[in-house]
Amino acid sequence: MTNANVTALSAAGTSTWLDDLSRQRIQSGNLQQLIDELAVVGVTTNPAIFATAMTKGSEYEEQLAELAATGADAAEAVFTMAIDDVRDACDVFAPVATATDGVDGRVSIEVDPRYAADYDKTISQARDLVARVGRENVLIKIPATPESIPAIETAISEGINVNVTLIFSVERYREVIEAYISGLEKAKAADLNLSAIHSVASFFVSRVDSEVDKRLAAIGTEEAKALEGKAALANAWLAYALYREQFSAQNPRWAALAEAGAKVQRPLWASTSVKNPAYPATLYVEELAAANTVNTMPESTLMAVADAEQAVSGAAITPEREAEGERIFEQLTALGVDMADVFRVLETEGVEKFVASWDELLTAIDGKLAAMR
C-alpha cells in the first residue's frame, strides 16, 4: 500500500520527487519500490548525485571499460553513463508520465555546470541531451544564472522541457517565469504543441536558512535569534505568491497561452533536507505543501515524511502565510540582514559547488579510464 503521509501530501497538491539516482537504485528495483510504496513520481539529479553514484560500487565498471577501449575522455564517459541511467529511469517512470499527461513521471539531467555563464554551450548541450536521452519525459536542468536565462527561453521556444535550477530569490524567479512565458509565446508563434511543453522552477530552500541564520547569529540579539529558521520558508511563501500571480487569468499573457493549451511552470522546492539538526526533518516539506508544487527530497527526508506521526492536512501556503513572509523579510532588513547579498552569495556558491562536484567526478573517472587503458 502507498504510504498515507505521502498520499496526503499529494492530496494537498505536492508531487513527491526523489533527489537521487544511481544505477544500483534502478537495477535493484528500489526505484520502482519507491514509486509503488511512497508515491514517488519523479527524480532529480545533479553533478553531486552522479559523483556519488559513479565513484562507489561496481555497477559502472563494465561500461567504463568499454568506454576506455573507445578512447572516450572523462566528460564523455560521465555523460554517456548518466544519460543511460536517466534513460532507464525515464522508462521506469513512463507509466506515471502517461497517467499524469506528462506532468509527473519526469527525470532531470543537468547541463555541464561549467557552462553556467555560457549561453551558446548551454543551449547546444540542452539540445544534445534531449536527443541522446531520447525520452519524452526527460527534463533538462539549466541554472537560473543571468547568462543562462536566455537559454531557458530558447529551450522552451523549441519545445525542450526544462527544470530551471539554482533559484534562490523571488527577483530571479520573476526572470525565470518571464523566460518561460516568452518561450511559450515563441513556441506558439512557431505552431508548436504547447500542451506538450513542461517545466518546473527549482527554488532552493534550506540553503537560505543556512546563510541567513549565520548572519543572525553574528548579530546576536534576541530579535535576531527569534528569526532563525524563518527566512527560507518566508522566501518560498513569497515565491509561491508570485507563482499564483503570474499564472492566473488576471495575467493576460498567461491567459492567452493557457487558452492555447499551455501548462503552468510548477514551483519545485529543492534543497529540502534540513541543514540544522535542531529543525524538524520534515520542516521544508510540511510547511510548503501547496497546489501545483513539487518537492524533491533526498531519501532521508522522504523517509522522515513517511514516518511522521501526523500527515499534512492540506495546503500549508495560504495568503496569510504569504503576508507573514513579507513581515519576516521586513524584520530581517530592519536587523541589517542584506537579503540581496544573501542571494548573490548563494547563487555563486551554488554554481561553484556543482562545478567542484563535477570536477571531482571527472578527475575520478579520468583516473579509472587511465588505469583501464
Image: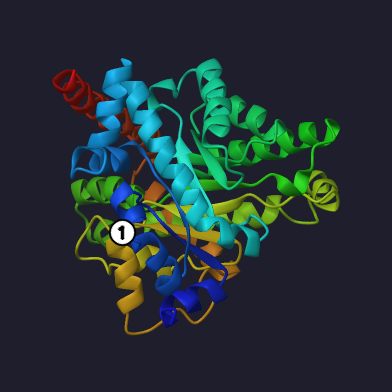
Which residue: 77% across, 44% down? 194
Q: Quadrant of the N terminus?
A: bottom left
Q: Vertically, is 317 above or below 235?
A: below
Image colouring: rainbow
Q: Nearer the viewer, residue 207 or 217?
A: 207
Q: Nearer the viewer, residue 55 or 216?
A: 55
Q: In which quarter of the view is residue 285 placed?
A: bottom left
Q: In which quarter of the view is residue 74 placed?
A: top left
Residue 117: percent from left, percent from top:
46, 20
Residue 175: percent from left, percent from top:
60, 36
Horizontally, is 252 left or right of 122 in the view? right
Residue 18: percent from left, percent from top:
40, 57
Which residue: 48% across, 56% down? 92
Q: Quadrant of the C terminus?
A: top left
Q: Is residue 39 in sight in this rendering?
A: yes
Q: Vertically, is 12 above or below 175?
A: below
Horizontally, is 118 left or right of 347 in the view? right
Q: Vertically, is 290 above or below 215?
A: below
Q: Is residue 326 in sight in this rendering?
A: no
Residue neighbourhood size for the residue with mark 1, other residues' Cα within 10 Å, grouped as few (<14), some (14–19), many (≥20): few
Q: Vertically, is 209 above or below 123?
A: below
Number of numbered discs present? 1
Q: Secondary structure at mark 1?
A: loop
Which residue: 49% across, 79% down? 8
Residue 297: percent from left, percent from top:
37, 58
Q: Which residue is mark 1?
A: 28
Q: In which quarter of the view is residue 355 placed?
A: top left
Q: Nearer the viewer, residue 354 or 203?
A: 354
Residue kind at label 1, given as amino acid type: Ser
